[in-house]
Amino acid sequence: MGGLLFIGCDGPPPDPTVEIGSSDDPLRHRMIPDGATVWITYGLQGGYHIWGSLSADHIDPDDVRMQFALFVDGAQVGGADYRDDLRRGPDGPFEYGGVTVFVYDDVPPETLHDRTVEMTLRLTDGAGEVIEDEVTVRARCCE
């Protein structure tokens, strides 16, 4: 009579994690530390954005909702809301890059030059688990 043997299952599963970053490569995440400089980029369709990315682990990677937001002095000045599946990156965690976090049309991008911008991310994975991260960066206008 056979049985099942479970190895390495002593304890609860790891908590889900997410790390916000900045990358113009749609397949890669690039971590940015608090205080890093990011460029406000002029897009092909005539608007401005800051590149966003994320790295996440211990999540359900299917049909993930990614809600990015940009804040200056507590006022929201931009954002993006995407749904997609995540893929494993070369180092293990899931990665997603090339997110255009739009600066709202009524916010002149030059008013954000050399300003402190809080970039936030609210990620809802395929199982409905919500995890969040934020980073404070210095914006440079315009690339």
Image (cartoon, rainbow, N blue to C red):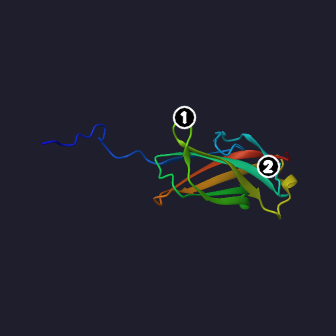
Question: Which of 63/79 is in front?
Answer: 63
| Amino acid type, label 1 | Asp
- The earlier-in-sequence mark between 1 and 2 is 1
Determine the secondary structure under disc 2: loop
Residue designated by label 2 = 115
Q: Is residue 132 left or right of residue 45?
A: left
Is mark 1 in CB contact (under 8 Å) with mark 2? no
The C terminus - image quarter: top right
* Cα distance in 3D space between marks 1 and 2: 33 Å
Q: Is residue 29 above or below residue 123?
A: above
| Amino acid type, label 2 | Arg
Q: Is residue 29 left or right of residue 112?
A: left
Q: What numbered label is drawn on residue 91? A: 1
Question: Which of 72/106 is in front?
Answer: 106
The N terminus - image quarter: top left
Where residue 71 sits, quadrant-wise, is: bottom right
Q: x, y percentage for residue 2?
A: 16, 42
Question: Which of 3/32 is in front?
Answer: 3
**Outermost top residue:** 91
Q: x, y percentage for residue 10?
A: 29, 41
* Residue located at (81% from left, 49% from top): 41
